[in-house]
Image: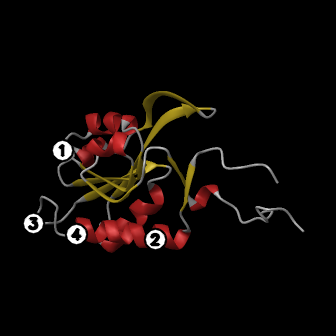
Amino acid sequence: MTDRLPHEKGFHVSWDQLHRDARALAWRLDGHGPDDGGWRMVVAITRGGMAPAMIVSRELDIRTVDTISVKSYNFQTRAEPQIIKAPNMDLVGDGTGVLIIDDLVDTGRTLEVVRATMPKAHVATVYAKPMGREQVETFITEVSQDTWIFFPWDMALQYVEPYRGTE
Protein backbone atom coordinates (compact mmCIF):
# COMPACT_ATOMS: atom_id res chain seq x y z
CA MET A 1 0.00 0.00 0.00
CA THR A 2 1.48 3.38 -0.97
CA ASP A 3 -0.81 5.63 1.08
CA ARG A 4 1.10 7.36 3.86
CA LEU A 5 0.07 9.77 6.56
CA PRO A 6 -0.76 13.17 5.11
CA HIS A 7 1.45 14.81 7.70
CA GLU A 8 5.16 14.46 8.26
CA LYS A 9 4.76 13.30 11.84
CA GLY A 10 1.87 11.53 13.51
CA PHE A 11 1.22 11.22 17.26
CA HIS A 12 -1.51 8.70 17.99
CA VAL A 13 -3.38 9.16 21.26
CA SER A 14 -5.49 6.27 22.58
CA TRP A 15 -8.46 6.70 24.92
CA ASP A 16 -6.31 5.30 27.74
CA GLN A 17 -3.51 7.77 27.04
CA LEU A 18 -5.92 10.69 26.82
CA HIS A 19 -7.44 9.69 30.14
CA ARG A 20 -4.02 9.46 31.82
CA ASP A 21 -2.92 12.81 30.37
CA ALA A 22 -6.17 14.57 31.33
CA ARG A 23 -5.85 13.22 34.89
CA ALA A 24 -2.25 14.48 34.97
CA LEU A 25 -3.58 17.89 33.86
CA ALA A 26 -6.07 17.84 36.75
CA TRP A 27 -3.33 16.96 39.22
CA ARG A 28 -1.21 19.83 37.91
CA LEU A 29 -4.15 22.25 38.33
CA ASP A 30 -5.19 20.99 41.77
CA GLY A 31 -4.72 23.62 44.44
CA HIS A 32 -3.72 26.37 42.00
CA GLY A 33 -7.07 28.14 41.65
CA PRO A 34 -7.67 31.65 42.99
CA ASP A 35 -10.26 30.59 45.60
CA ASP A 36 -8.01 29.00 48.25
CA GLY A 37 -6.61 26.86 45.44
CA GLY A 38 -10.02 25.84 44.12
CA TRP A 39 -11.69 26.36 40.78
CA ARG A 40 -15.34 27.32 40.52
CA MET A 41 -16.10 26.34 36.93
CA VAL A 42 -14.84 24.53 33.84
CA VAL A 43 -15.48 25.75 30.29
CA ALA A 44 -14.70 23.14 27.62
CA ILE A 45 -13.79 24.26 24.13
CA THR A 46 -15.90 22.09 21.86
CA ARG A 47 -15.42 19.61 20.57
CA GLY A 48 -11.91 18.45 21.44
CA GLY A 49 -11.92 19.89 24.94
CA MET A 50 -15.05 18.04 26.05
CA ALA A 51 -13.44 14.72 27.02
CA PRO A 52 -10.50 16.31 28.89
CA ALA A 53 -12.86 18.80 30.59
CA MET A 54 -15.07 15.96 31.79
CA ILE A 55 -12.07 14.19 33.30
CA VAL A 56 -10.60 17.35 34.86
CA SER A 57 -13.95 18.39 36.35
CA ARG A 58 -14.43 14.90 37.80
CA GLU A 59 -10.95 14.76 39.29
CA LEU A 60 -11.22 18.24 40.83
CA ASP A 61 -14.90 17.82 41.83
CA ILE A 62 -16.03 20.85 39.84
CA ARG A 63 -19.77 20.59 39.21
CA THR A 64 -20.30 23.70 37.08
CA VAL A 65 -19.30 22.83 33.52
CA ASP A 66 -20.18 24.71 30.34
CA THR A 67 -18.93 24.88 26.75
CA ILE A 68 -17.74 27.42 24.24
CA SER A 69 -17.76 26.53 20.56
CA VAL A 70 -15.34 28.20 18.17
CA LYS A 71 -15.38 27.49 14.47
CA SER A 72 -12.06 28.01 12.72
CA TYR A 73 -12.19 25.49 9.88
CA ASN A 74 -14.30 25.29 6.74
CA PHE A 75 -13.94 22.00 4.89
CA GLN A 76 -10.38 21.41 6.14
CA THR A 77 -9.19 24.99 5.46
CA ARG A 78 -8.54 27.57 8.13
CA ALA A 79 -10.86 30.52 8.53
CA GLU A 80 -11.04 33.37 11.02
CA PRO A 81 -12.13 31.87 14.37
CA GLN A 82 -15.61 32.85 15.47
CA ILE A 83 -17.59 31.93 18.55
CA ILE A 84 -20.75 30.09 17.55
CA LYS A 85 -21.86 29.14 21.08
CA ALA A 86 -20.83 31.02 24.23
CA PRO A 87 -20.99 29.79 27.83
CA ASN A 88 -23.35 31.31 30.38
CA MET A 89 -21.58 34.62 30.91
CA ASP A 90 -23.59 35.33 34.08
CA LEU A 91 -21.70 32.40 35.62
CA VAL A 92 -18.38 33.06 33.88
CA GLY A 93 -18.05 36.77 34.65
CA ASP A 94 -14.54 37.96 33.80
CA GLY A 95 -13.24 34.40 34.11
CA THR A 96 -11.81 34.52 37.63
CA GLY A 97 -11.75 30.96 38.97
CA VAL A 98 -12.68 29.50 35.59
CA LEU A 99 -10.68 26.77 33.91
CA ILE A 100 -10.81 26.78 30.11
CA ILE A 101 -9.95 23.29 28.88
CA ASP A 102 -9.05 22.14 25.39
CA ASP A 103 -7.35 19.10 23.95
CA LEU A 104 -4.65 21.00 22.05
CA VAL A 105 -3.33 24.45 21.34
CA ASP A 106 -1.95 24.60 17.81
CA THR A 107 -1.47 28.14 16.46
CA GLY A 108 -3.28 29.75 19.41
CA ARG A 109 -5.82 31.57 17.26
CA THR A 110 -8.83 29.82 18.83
CA LEU A 111 -7.58 30.57 22.33
CA GLU A 112 -7.03 34.24 21.48
CA VAL A 113 -10.74 34.53 20.69
CA VAL A 114 -11.75 32.58 23.80
CA ARG A 115 -9.42 34.57 26.08
CA ALA A 116 -10.98 37.82 24.89
CA THR A 117 -14.33 36.71 26.34
CA MET A 118 -12.87 35.47 29.65
CA PRO A 119 -9.68 37.48 30.26
CA LYS A 120 -9.05 36.28 33.83
CA ALA A 121 -9.67 32.57 33.17
CA HIS A 122 -6.91 29.99 33.38
CA VAL A 123 -6.30 28.16 30.09
CA ALA A 124 -5.15 24.55 30.21
CA THR A 125 -4.66 22.06 27.40
CA VAL A 126 -3.53 18.48 27.36
CA TYR A 127 -1.17 19.02 24.42
CA ALA A 128 0.60 22.14 23.15
CA LYS A 129 2.49 23.17 20.03
CA PRO A 130 5.12 25.94 20.08
CA MET A 131 3.16 28.54 18.05
CA GLY A 132 0.25 28.52 20.51
CA ARG A 133 2.23 27.82 23.68
CA GLU A 134 2.00 31.42 24.97
CA GLN A 135 -1.81 31.18 25.07
CA VAL A 136 -1.73 28.38 27.66
CA GLU A 137 -0.85 28.56 31.35
CA THR A 138 -0.87 24.80 31.98
CA PHE A 139 -0.36 21.79 29.69
CA ILE A 140 0.99 18.25 29.90
CA THR A 141 2.83 17.38 26.67
CA GLU A 142 4.46 19.63 24.07
CA VAL A 143 4.84 18.34 20.52
CA SER A 144 6.56 19.92 17.53
CA GLN A 145 4.57 22.26 15.30
CA ASP A 146 4.68 19.80 12.39
CA THR A 147 3.27 16.92 14.44
CA TRP A 148 -0.32 15.91 13.69
CA ILE A 149 -2.12 14.52 16.74
CA PHE A 150 -4.58 11.75 15.97
CA PHE A 151 -7.18 11.81 18.74
CA PRO A 152 -9.19 8.69 19.60
CA TRP A 153 -12.51 10.23 18.55
CA ASP A 154 -11.09 10.68 15.02
CA MET A 155 -9.78 7.14 14.64
CA ALA A 156 -11.09 3.66 13.90
CA LEU A 157 -9.29 0.34 14.10
CA GLN A 158 -8.64 -1.21 10.72
CA TYR A 159 -6.22 -3.48 8.95
CA VAL A 160 -2.98 -1.88 7.71
CA GLU A 161 -0.85 -3.37 4.94
CA PRO A 162 2.69 -4.29 5.99
CA TYR A 163 5.29 -1.69 5.10
CA ARG A 164 7.30 -3.98 2.80
CA GLY A 165 4.43 -5.75 1.10
CA THR A 166 2.51 -8.94 1.73
CA GLU A 167 4.95 -11.70 0.73
The first of marks 4 and 2 along the sequence is 2
Q: Callout 4 environment at 10 Å: few (<14), some (14 to 19), or many (20+)?
A: some
Q: Which residue is mark 2?
A: 19
Disc number lying in front (4 or 3): 4
The C terminus lies in which quarter of the figure?
A: bottom right
Judged from the image, the secondary structure of the residue bearing numbered disc 4 is loop
Image point 58% across, 46% down: which residue? 8
Q: Which residue is mark 1?
A: 120
Q: Which residue is mark 3?
A: 36
CA separation in Å, label 4 and label 1: 18 Å
Disc number lying in front (1 or 2): 2
CA separation in Å, label 3 and label 1: 16 Å
The first of marks 4 and 3 along the sequence is 4
Q: How many labels sit on residues?
A: 4
CA separation in Å, label 2 and label 3: 26 Å
Disc number placed over residue 18 in the picture, else none:
none
Identity, as a three-letter code, of the amino acid under mark 3: Asp
